[in-house]
Image (cartoon, rainbow, N blue to C red):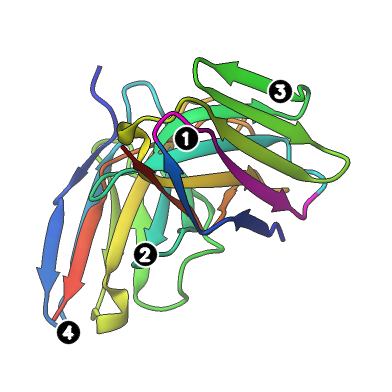
Amino acid sequence: NAGVMQNPRHLVRRRGQEARLRCSPMKGHSHVYWYRQLPEEGLKFMVYLQKENIIDESGMPKERFSAEFPKEGPSILRIQQVVRGDSAAYFCASSPPTSASTDTQYFGPGTRLTVL
Amino acid sequence: GENVEQHPSTLSVQEGDSAVIKCTYSDSASNYFPWYKQELGKGPQLIIDIRSNVGEKKDQRIAVTLNKTAKHFSLHITETQPEDSAVYFCAATDSWGKLQFGAGTQVVVTP
């Protein structure tokens, strides 16, 4: 029973390039959440998606960041024109297709993005 | 929105002693409170959670207590072992169901 999978685990980009982070939820889960963790800080909510729908993107920066969760395939967090301040660990979590407010979220291993 | 505060930021305990981490939250509508353990270079791992209809939950050496009136909840680890060394995060759901995390507690268990 595979857990939440994320790839790549480490990603290095130069300023101005694009970063694409992928997340495959646990089997049977249809809710995906993305969080960002800066060094020695807690996790900050970015976006909550269900299949083909963005439910809540209140934590996403207004520019350069986008997320999708297509009908087929993994969820993608896309960062365009990366800047040094985007360097962080990005975690994906998934939960089962029931009421959202009290669902347990299971986290993936994260993608560590370094912007040179 | 929800605001979660966590204390202490670091905690050093002797092996075999107990460790207690406390969190407070601001949104009285919050009804789900998980605790996660994060080891270096890894993702957060759920270790225990509690819902608002109970005041205490225990799983072997780990227990969580919830005081909804005072809006605080605590993690208790008894008989600590070196493998308990990690960063622990509390979290609470806000009115929209999103998890808001505390800043984390670095726990160091010394042999």
User: Could you give the CA–CA distance between mark 2 and mark 3, rounded to whole angstroms?
Assistant: 40 Å
Mark 2, residues whose alpha carbon is within 10 Å: few (<14), some, or many (≥20)? Answer: some
Q: Which residues are magenta?
A: B15-27
Q: Quadrant of the C terminus of chain A?
A: bottom left
Q: Which residue is mark 4?
A: A15
Q: Name the quarter where the N terminus of chain A is drawn.
A: top left
C-alpha gap between disc 3 and disc 4: 49 Å
Would residue B95 be visible to someone looking at this image? yes
Q: For the point 26% across and 75% down, which residue is it?
A: A80
Instruction: Choose the circle earlier in sequence order: 2 or 1.
Output: 2
Report the residue marked by disc 2.
Answer: A66
Q: Chain of mark 2?
A: A
**Badge 1: chain ID:** A
Q: Earlier in the sequence, mark 4 or mark 2?
A: 4
Residue occupied by mark 1: A105
What is the three-letter code of the residue carrying label 2?
A: Ser
Q: Position of residue A12 (x, y in %)?
A: 11, 69
Q: CA distance from mark 3 to mark 1?
A: 20 Å
Crowd rating for badge 4 (residues with CA inside 10 Å; few <14, some 14–19, many 20+): some
| Labels 3 and 4 positioned on one and the same chain | no
- Image coordinates for residue B87, horizontal then vertical, percent: 40, 48
Q: Please count the marks in the image.
A: 4
Mark identifier at residue B56: 3
- In this view, the mark in front (2 or 1): 1
Answer yes or no: do the residues labelled 2 and 1 have beta carbons within 8 Å? no
Q: Residue at x 77, y 25 (%)?
A: B55
